[in-house]
Amino acid sequence: MKAQDVMTADPACCTPESTAREAARMMRDNDCGCVPVVEGGSKRVIGVVTDRDIACRCVAEGKGAETPVRELMTKDPQCCHPGDDIAAVEQTMMQAQVRRVPVVDAKGNCVGMIAQADLALNDKAANDSEIGRVVERISEPSGAARA
């Protein structure tokens, strides 16, 4: 099975100039917890902003709803390609400890998004044991959190 078989095609995207409020509304309106951040007219992925980024890097730091996404986003996210095997996407999620991976074309333009839930919902993508292993590895505390 390939990434294109389980991805959400053409996800909502924002730009670095979008505000935290706009990103949060996109998440609400599209029932998602992560929005790819793309450059201008292209859809080249330069980052991602998550609901957690908004909570931790904006609200918890006392920043307002008009804070630009560029101040909140995670830059240079791990991405995959439509033709990548699901096993490779799982490895990316485990190694980077992320729950969502943008799917990009050869030019780096956003064409989809794969979430941990997409793998769990698609019977053909992985069995329960594999999903459990992925969730466990993604959820391991980082070195800083363990100390």
Image: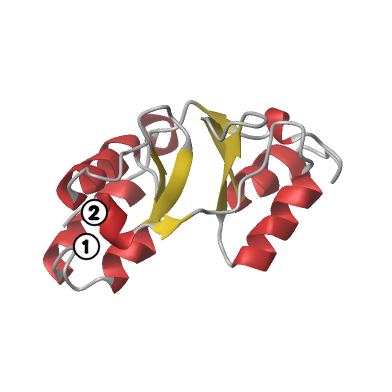
Q: Quadrant of residue 126?
A: bottom left
The crowding category of the residue bearing disc 1, from other C-alpha atoms within 10 Å (few below 14, some 14 to 19, many at least 20), is some
The residue lying at 42 percent from left, 27 percent from top is: 107
Disc 1 from disc 2: Cα separation: 5 Å
Instruction: Out of 112 and 123, give the one closest to the viewer.
Output: 112
Write the residue at 62% across / 34% down.
73
Q: Is residue 7 above or below residue 109?
A: below
Q: Secondary structure at mark 1?
A: helix
Residue wearing tag 1: 131
Answer yes or no: do the residues labelled 1 and 2 have beta carbons within 8 Å? yes
Amino acid type, mark 2: Val
In this rendering, position of residue 88 left or right of residue 41: left
Residue 50, position in %: x, y? 58, 47
76 lies left or right of 67: left
Q: Which mark is residue 134?
A: 2
Residue at 56 percent of width and 61 percent of height: 32
Quarter occupied by the N terminus: bottom left
Quadrant where the image shows the C terminus? top left
